[in-house]
Image (cartoon, helix red, strand yellow):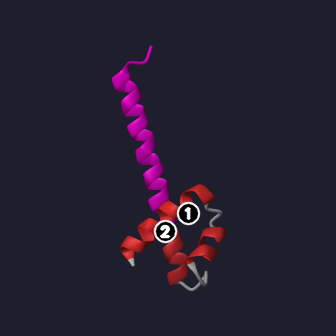
Amino acid sequence: MCTFSEALIEKSELRGEIRGEIKGMAKGVLQLVKNHIASNIEQAMDMLSVEPSSREDIMKILEQKL
């Protein structure tokens, strides 16, 4: 049986994985635009098949970098 603390650890690990994935996608989007493969951020996200639910988070990350 899972204890409460184990459940919290699993949830934290999952959040970390998701954040890592989103940061990786943001980096990929930025590289596509910088290398002129995509003409804008939306096109780059389309090329990478970014889920609509992740796009807002990626935009927030990119706004901090730009």
Q: Which mark is residue 59?
A: 2
Residue 37: give x, y in percent of width and height: 60, 82
CA–CA distance between discs 2 and 1? 6 Å
Horizontal side of residue 41 vs 63, given as left or right: right
Figure check: 34 above or below 14: below
Figure check: 40 above or below 14: below
Residue 65: give x, y in percent of width and height: 38, 74
The residue lying furthest to the left in this view is 5
Using the image as rendered, state which of residue 35 and residue 39 is in the foreground.
39
- The amino acid at mark 2 is Met
Can residue 51 be seen?
A: no
User: In the image, what residue occupies the spot 44% across and 53% down?
Assistant: 19
Number of numbered discs visible in the structure rendering: 2
Determine which residue is flagged by label 1. 55
Residue 14: give x, y in percent of width and height: 45, 41
**The N terminus, quarter of image:** top left
Q: Which residues are magenta?
A: 1-26
| Residue 65 part of the magenta segment | no
User: In the image, what residue occupies the spot 39% across and 79% down?
Assistant: 66
- The amino acid at mark 1 is Arg
Q: Secondary structure at mark 1?
A: helix
Figure check: 29 above or below 17: below
Horizontal side of residue 3 vs 50, given as left or right: left
| Residue 14 part of the magenta segment | yes
Figure check: 61 above or below 21: below
Labels 2 & 1 near each other (Cβ < 8 A): yes
The residue lying furthest to the top in this view is 1
Using the image as rendered, state which of residue 28 and residue 66 is in the foreground.
66
Residue 2: give x, y in percent of width and height: 43, 18
